[in-house]
Amino acid sequence: MKIGVLSYEHQKLALDGRDWQNIGDYIQSYAMYQILQEMNLTDQIDMVSKFELDSYDGDYIFLMMNSFNNLLNQAYLQQTVYPISKKIIPFYISYNLHSSMPDQVADFFRMHEPIGCRDEFTMLNMRKHNIRSYLSGCVTALMPRCAKVPSNGKILFIDTPKSLEPYVPMELRDRIEYASHLVPIQRTTGEHILTKEESKEIWKYTKKRMEYYQNEVSLVVTSRLHASVPCMAMGLPVIVVHDNTAGIFAWLDKFLPLYSPHTFKDIDWNPAPVEYEEEKAYMKKIFKKQIQQKYDEIKDIYDLSSFYEKREKCVYHETIKSYIEQVPIDHSKPIKYVIWGTVNKSTIIKNAIDMYFPHWQLTHAVDLKCQGQFECLDIEKPDIIDHLEDDLIYIVVPDSAHKPVSKLLQEKGKKYILLNYTVCEWSDNIDNA
């Protein structure tokens, strides 16, 4: 069974032809890739686009979900990926979600508890919905420390706010190099979607930037989470500045002071690297243990399922499908229907309708003798038909009910289909449906 790392091709770009990407996303995936490499899982790693989680249809894959919200539809995301593909078994660690979630999404997260949350705001958001969660920090904090920091290298300002400028010491200004994690895309098509080739080029650029930070930089000043954290992990001195320190940083202050305009005057412009190699080793051990345990738990059962699923499949419910297609109605329109007779064949017929005519809706179940529920609907007695809307189609299943029920429905001017494995007949007025 493959282990997935998030990639970012096929992202919908803005309608104005946006031509940049935030390499922070790529740095997160790069850090997770390194963790899996250290676990000797390189041969099992595969990439899955964050923007195709709903449509993925490859082999079952155990996917690392260390990322910013990749489920909910917000205007600025431009794409909804919930519900995700059933072929993906998600593993939530170093995950960020601050926005409100509907009940069905909360239920989804409960299926994959505990959720490893990148920041405290995400953890509290999960716990508000009674989802078991814990504060994991960001996987980029586990990147390896570089051998040596240049003593007189660049002072790199990455996406720093303009409000910081008056506080920058004069003696540092000659060494400052300005950079951004919003990097230009060399577009290869005119489409408003990021191609796989374009995404690969951003990967290459990201790795070069990480090497540059390691070899040429002595101090990083940034507002970017995924500039400050990986640089801190690599042993570079880091200063975090922001016009408004948001909740995504609500864990990083364990290691670094977080400066905003009212504290810019207090910035230590000669900070020491953060020494946390012992803690890093402990955190990395926890990450690896969780990944390995979950992978060992699921890989065999999904490999077994895959063994059975990969076969030459027959056409199921072919008889029912062909019968319904003979009925003179517009099959493209939504149809509301009633099942009359709650026998085993009725469930099979409903399954066939769900498979081939998904826009049809079962609204009522009628049976003279049975009580209880059928397909989550309360079973009703035949006299209910006097109170139901006229556009319903009654599907009468039991052979024994065909003659008396069709006579009753005909007298009341109702549309019906007499249907089972060997019979398909319909009322004269059904072509008006």
Image (cartoon, grey):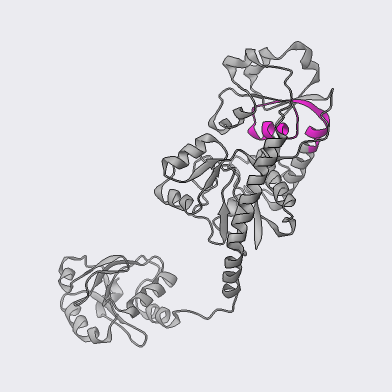
**Total number of numbered discs in the rendering:** 0
**The C terminus appears in which quarter of the rendering?**
bottom left
Above-or-below relation of 261 to 144: above
Residue 274 visible in image: yes
Relative depth, front residue between 286 and 156? 286
Above-or-below relation of 236 to 78: above
Residue displayed at 69% across by 38% down: 280
Residue 49 visible in image: no
> Does residue 218 show up magenta in the picture?
yes
Query: Going by the image, does 165 lie left or right of 423?
Result: right
Residue 128, image x, y percentages: 42, 40
Above-or-below relation of 253 to 384: above
> Does residue 246 show up magenta in the picture?
no
**The N terminus appears in which quarter of the rendering?**
bottom right
Relative depth, front residue between 176 and 369? 369
Residue 212, image x, y percentages: 80, 34
Residue 184, image x, y percentages: 71, 38
Query: Going by the image, does 319 lie left or right of 134?
Result: left
Residue displayed at 61% across by 45% down: 66
Q: Quadrant of residue 60?
A: bottom right
Q: Which residues are magenta?
A: 211-236
